[in-house]
Image: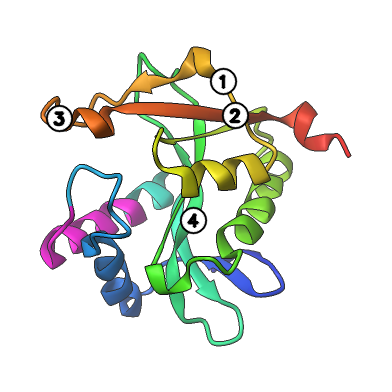
Amino acid sequence: MIIVETPRLRVRNWLETDRPLFAEINADPKVMEFFPRRRSREESDALMDEVKRRIDETGLGFFALALKETDEPIGFLGLARTDLEPHLPDGTVEIGWRLAARFWQKGYVTEASETMLRHGFETHGLEEIVSFAVEQNTRSTAVMQRLGMRHDRSRDFDHPRVPDTLPHLKHHVLYALNREDWQKP
């Protein structure tokens, strides 16, 4: 099932044939630079199963991002409910993405995210969408800024699932966009 499409991309449900790409991005040191660890193929397969389960339960989650012309998967993108209380209240929805490095710097994440934001506000009736990343992850925070999201320093937090042994990955900055600001020209 296709969730949203853009001129070059589609956000769609995962296929079994997407597992190698999903494993590739979760094992790539460049892609995973700002995450606590890379995943083995077995761990990646288990994570994909969990991602699919959450989508089935909530209708939200991280879907496959594919090239529209060929349907080749290039990463993932979506809207997902966070489970980071007390840092983010229950019901908070984040937009997130991860792309295979060979597809970076082509504007794919920004293009798909703009359409996904519209989907979140119009189809799901969300009042706010957030995104967060390690402060040094300027590639992701630049996308957040291009999307019109604003850094809310009062909501920055130390990620509870990042081990204290990795202090350079613990602090996360939060960007937010509410419906009213999204609707402004």
Tell me the distance, in whole angstroms, between the alpha carbons under discs 2 and 3. Answer: 25 Å
Left or right: 83 as drawn, with respect to 12: left
Dot 1 crowding, Cα within 10 Å, few <14, some 14–19, many 20+: few
Which residues make up the magenta segment? 38-52
Residue underneath mark 1 = 152
The colour scheme used here is: rainbow
The quadrant of the image that shows the N terminus is bottom right
Identity of the residue drawn at 21% across and 63% down: 27
Q: Amino acid at mark 2?
A: Ala
In this picture, is 69 found above or below 128?
Answer: below
Tell me the distance, in whole angstroms, between the alpha carbons under discs 1 and 4. Answer: 22 Å
Residue underneath mark 3 = 163
Q: Nearer the viewer, mark 1 or mark 4?
A: 1
Q: Quadrant of residue 179?
A: top right
Which label number is shown at residue 77? 4
Based on the picture, tell me whether residue 45 belongs to the magenta stretch. Answer: yes
Looking at marks 2 and 4 on the same chain, the residue that comes earlier in the sequence is marked by 4
What kind of element bears circle 4?
A: strand
Which label number is shown at residue 176? 2
Identity of the residue drawn at 21% across and 31% down: 162
Based on the picture, tell me whether residue 43 belongs to the magenta stretch. Answer: yes
